[in-house]
Image (cartoon, grey):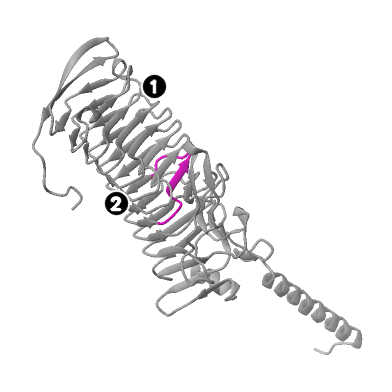
Amino acid sequence: MAFSSFEKSALLVLASLIIASASTINVVMSESPSCITYDPSDVVITVRCKTANLRDINSQLNDPNILHQESLDGIWQLNAGIFVDKDATLYINSSDLSWLKILTKQGVEKYNKTNYIEVHGSLKIDSVKISSWDRSENDYSKNPGSRDLSENYVKIGTPRPYLNVESDATGTTDITNSELAYLGYEGGVGIGADDGLTYFGGEESVIKNNNIHHLYFGFYSNGVGNITIENNAIHHNAHYGLDPHTGTHDMVIRNNVVYDNGGIGIICSLDCYNIMIENNKTYNNTKMGIMFSRNMYDSVARNNIVAREEKGIVISESHNNQIYNNHVLDSGRGIDLDKESYSNVIYNNTFRNIPVPSDALYIEDGAAEKNILHFTKVSPSFQQIKSVNGEQNNTRSTFVTQIPQESSDPFS
């Protein structure tokens, strides 16, 4: 078919428009936003992918100043924060790396300018090590700071990287078979998420089979429920070992070894409820092994071994709890019950090597009128304790019998 000159011109114009249109479409597609982005002003990587891992981040950013593999044995360095957005899931596991070193920024004073991992979606950590790293020292960052609020003392630490799960998190943050070390610091009381490992959200998360050490707080939570903390070693943290706090509920703390922490081993404080603390071993912590504090209620501590503490188990201003089948030894006091606590049931606990036998079950004046105490054994001395059933207000005698010393180490 022959085309006139006019038709040929029209066809050329049409072809040009088609090519231009295709070119425009290609440009739009190439500029579509990625689900992994980096903000250099905030030094933060944002993950919005349904699923992503460290290699995905590295491939997208392709900048060794932000993230790079340090060695062939799977050690990586991260020089930024990571923000896991709602409905996104980030995997940090042994398929990508063995050790993630999160770099400590130099000369930083404000806590929110340090590197961190902040979760609004979901995070899955498995079979890896995550720690701070100070490149100037070629070592962990080792100045977490400290506090003793009873002495009104706070020492601000070096801003160290931390891991935080926010209250609007849409999934769980599960940490399994891993090591967390040298994270978190004292940024000031009430500052926020800088404690090391903090959960404000992440209902039904699991923290299991980990080695958690040299954090500021080994664990802190606020207003979250249904978390399981199981089979972990939690030790040498600068302040508390495990600190479920304000309104934490329906939590299981089971089969952990909690020792050599700079504060209380396990403490639940301020309106905690439905907390199960069972089959744990706590020793060599500062002041106390296990503490129920400030309106903790409907909770249980059972089958725990507590040793070498100033006070073994303390119930303070807390109500309707059960403390039974625990073994407290080599401590200044066994179980300490204050008069501000009521309707607690304490029974079948065993004490050994408490220097003053009457301190095995230490009851502040008035406390026995509001709590039920029975079936308690102490060694090496015999004593008798009078207790009162608060509901019926009738006195019962409780016999505390002598049992033989044990030579075996309960922590072996």
x then y, percent, for residue 213:
38, 56
**Can you tell which mark lies on residue 340?**
1
Question: What stretch of residues is rendered in magenta?
Answer: 214-227
* Camera-nearest residue between 14 and 147: 147
Q: Secondary structure at mark 2?
A: loop
Q: Residues within 10 Å of mark 2 (few under 14, many from 20)?
A: many
How many numbered discs sit on the rendered protein? 2
Compared to residue 135, the image places residue 396 above or below, namely above
Q: Earlier in the sequence, mark 1 or mark 2?
A: 2
**Which quadrant is the N terminus positioned in?**
bottom right
Compared to residue 172, the image places residue 306 above or below, namely above
Q: Secondary structure at mark 1?
A: loop
x then y, percent, for residue 107:
62, 63
Q: Amino acid at mark 2?
A: Asn
Give yes or no for residue 367 being in the magenta stretch: no
Which residue matches tag 2? 231
**Which residue corresponds to the image point at 70% horizontal and 74% vertical from the top-left?**
26
Side (left or right) of 242 relative to 374: right
**Which residue corresponds to the image point at 27% horizontal and 34% vertical from the top-left?**
333
